[in-house]
Amino acid sequence: MAIPPQPWPTGLCEQLEPLVRRVLAPNGSPFTYTGTQTYLVGTADGVAVIDPGPDLPGHLAALDAAIGEVPVTAILCTHTHRDHSPAAAPLAARTGAPIVGCAPLALVSDEPRADVPFDTAYRADRVLGDGEAVAGPGWTLTAVATPGHTSNHLCYALEESGALFTGDHVMGWSTTVVAPPDGDMAAYMASLDKLHARDDRIYFPAHGPAVRNPRQLVRGMIGHRRQRERQILKLLGSHALAIPELVPLMYKGVDERLWPAAGQSVKAHLLDLERRGLVARSEDLWTTLTNPGLS
Ligand SMILES: [Zn+2]
């Protein structure tokens, strides 16, 4: 989870492939890496905009410039975190394009501030289910339901070129934060398995560089999560621990600003392990229920 040595240029429209252009939003941070990448997919006859990003005047101006006179067929969001979807509504107002794709999030939680990372104002003109598509001149984007990072997360497969827009589900620069109550580790793992079973040629994530060895990366991520799980069971095997005690043991060498987010993923693992009957909690302390037989 390193922060890049130099900021990438924001506001420019870069052609990545014949059907794919990118505009980087000026919202770099330890959580968004160099910022949110908004993708323009299609041709001069019509484009889709994937993850319009934060509602920042400079970013919308850059999108205006990149779009020019090209008709916008659809605006798609992978999910409704605040760094992905807030520019959808102003972009729809400017272009007349419908907002198509992920569902608004119905967050059922009474945990304090649980909805803070979410764009609760997001509305869709058409929600895409798994396998449903939106098409324009020379391109077809098919939704691949990938819950886990959020419950409403979709990836989009560009059928004509074998590219997959992975949002925050799989990124090359960092593992994904899975933050309960909406984030769900079991769902996330199932969504990794789902991508591993596909044969996409390249991933374009919302943050960080394109991934040219997708299945290898996904296989590595599945292994990484299993290793984290074993690590938690092993640490709890010696004594009961609270999440703030687990994080420094598990994330040595990681930027401490990311520890609270790491704690969310640890919590997601613990809730998953609890559901599977492998750990239990008493107040804030977690213990193992079975000896996992690990060395
Ligand atoms: Zn996100």
Image (cartoon, rainbow, N blue to C red):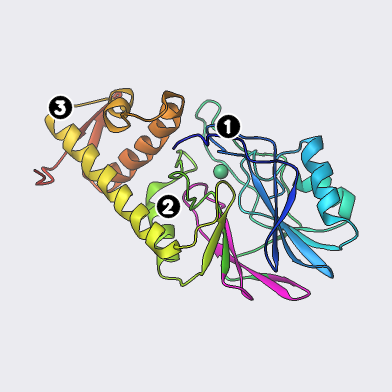
The reply, left or right, for residue 71 in relation to residue 41 is: right
- Mark 3 or mark 2, which is nearer the start of the sequence? 2
Residue matched to label 3: 239
Q: Of 223 and 183, which appears nearest the observer?
A: 223
Q: Which mark is residue 188?
A: 2
Q: CA distance from mark 3 to mark 1?
A: 35 Å
Asked if the beta carbon under badge 3 is closer than 8 A to the nearest atom of ligand 1, the reply is: no
Q: Is residue 23 magenta?
A: no
Question: Where does residue 175 sit, x and y in percent of width and height?
Answer: 43, 45
Image quarter where ligand 1 lies: top right
Residue matched to label 1: 29
Which kind of residue does numbered mark 3 sit on?
His
Q: Secondary structure at mark 2?
A: helix
Q: Nearer the viewer, mark 2 or mark 1?
A: 1
Q: Residue at x 41, y 64 (%)?
A: 215
Q: Quadrant of the C terminus?
A: top left
Q: Which mark is residue 293?
A: none
Which kind of residue does numbered mark 2 sit on?
Tyr
Q: Secondary structure at mark 1?
A: loop
Q: Residue at x 85, y 49 (%)?
A: 64
The residues colored magenta run 134-162
The reply, left or right, for residue 249 in relation to residue 201 is: left
Which kind of residue does numbered mark 1 sit on?
Ser
Q: Residue at x 40, y 58 (%)?
A: 218
Question: Where does residue 114 sit, x and y in percent of width and height?
Answer: 54, 32
Q: CA distance from mark 2 to mark 1?
A: 23 Å
